[in-house]
Amino acid sequence: MDRRTLVKIGGLGALGLGVGGCSARAASDVVRRATSLRLVPVDASWDRVIRTTVGLRPFRHSGFVVKAERFDEKTLIHNYGHGGAGMSLSWGTGFLAAELALEQESRSAAVIGSGVAGLTTARQLQRMGFDVTIYAMTVPPNTTSNMSYAQFTPTSGIIGIRARTPKWDNQFRRAVGVAYKQLQLLAGSEYGISWLNQYTLLSGPPTRDDVPLDEESDETDRLLPDAYRTKPVLLGPGEHPFPSQYVHSRPAMRIEPSIYLDALVSEFRLAGGKVMIRKFETREEIGKLEENVIFNCTGLGAKALFGDEELTPVKGQLTVLIPQSEVNYSTAGGIPGASRDTRGFSPHMQPRSDGIVLGGTSERGESTLEPNEEAMRRIVDAHIAFFNAMWSPPSVSAL
Ligand SMILES: Cc1cc2nc3c(=O)[nH]c(=O)nc-3n(C[C@H](O)[C@H](O)[C@H](O)COP(=O)(O)OP(=O)(O)OC[C@H]3O[C@@H](n4cnc5c(N)ncnc54)[C@H](O)[C@@H]3O)c2cc1C
């Protein structure tokens, strides 16, 4: 999600304050004129909810870890802690991690973990000529990666403010470069990767003095070279059908996790890779593997396995509605009042072939996988209000 733009969403309560300066306008008062932008509203209602999923993002205050260390007679290479950006960055950090193994004589590697970090690391290793076995206690569809909203959001919840170091920044920039190119090349139905327009509601015309809601992302955003972000186009009143005066429109890359991760597993197997279902309780058990080069891609699992106390779960919840193939855009932000008082709640919608995905929560330090009923209610109600307030062209609503 575009965090720079998202920072402005916090002011949605001031929607309508924009140009005319009419304070406290209700959503229904926003003038929504007919527009040439013909978008079908999501049919959002409680009757159409088909599931709610929960995932725990593996967040580290000082960012993801990609580094090698001696492990008795073996080499252990870490690649974990991608926070809210693992689906975006993994081809890149997988490449950096695999590169570290090239110094080793052995061309046989074990990868622990079969989420997006493990699978892409394994593929990068195969491309460099390694024989790879993945060991994991769960495989897709039962990984955190499958619970992802999965847009290309490389800076989202990736590192704590002021925790960056020049070394990490350098790794981050290289990782984004590799990942962005790789994901673009996988676009198509086979991998479930595609581009669509994202519309982000603004509180008014963009100004310089907007206060960031999420300083961490805003700060990291500055690291991202312009080449790796798509440029937003500002749409004003009458130019879009959304319940807001101003909207940013920009192309966004969407990943459908269930298609993408299964495709990665198939590709890995086709290239001769093996998958073993196995849970490791201790570091010592890992040391007994026959491979001399071992990759730790266990996400949040690295906390217990390698004692990384910095790892913190950030709970995210998605509620999914019955698919609507005619919805071909995503949205970020809500209508006035929907998200004002709750930091960490920013409604967003992305259509996929397995459903219309509604998200918006980030609960740091929360480690339960039980859906939070209150969060679900907020997410669904915010989107019902949003899409009910969206202007729909008569020809489309008559369908
Ligand atoms: C709601 C939500 C929305 C998100 N949205 C986005 C987004 O829009 N864009 C984006 O880029 N990212 C997003 N993310 C973040 C992204 O999903 C994660 O960063 C990513 O999935 C982490 O991948 P991983 O492979 O490191 O971990 P996982 O997917 O958790 O995989 C870890 C693997 O390690 C294995 N494992 C762990 N411990 C052990 C053990 N002891 N023994 C054996 N195996 C073990 C597991 O079984 C699993 O196979 C989102 C996440 C959530 C929850």
Image: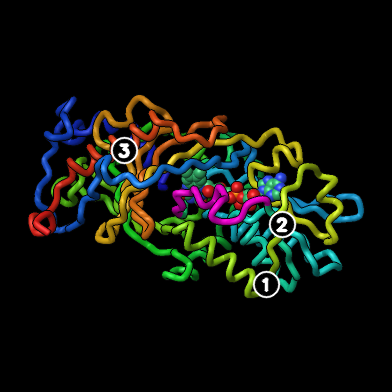
> Does ligand 1 reach within 8 Å of label 2's beta carbon?
yes
> x, y (%) of residue 37?
18, 57
Image height check: is 72 above or below 367? Answer: below
In-front residue for pair 259/393? 259
Residue shown at 26%/50% (left/top)? 234
Q: Are marks 1 and 2 in contact (CB under 8 Å)?
A: no
Of badges 1 and 3, nearer the viewer stands 3
Residue topped by disc 1: 127
Residue 380's label in the rendered image is: 3
Number of numbered discs present?
A: 3
Verify whether residue 140 appears in magenta.
yes
Q: Are marks 3 and 2 in contact (CB under 8 Å)?
A: no
In-front residue for pair 230/267? 267
Look at the numbered disc 3 and give the secondary structure of its residue: helix
Three-letter amino acid code at the position of disc 2? Tyr
Number of residues whose C-alpha sits closer than 10 Å to that of mark 2, classed few (under 14), some (14–19) or many (20 or more): many
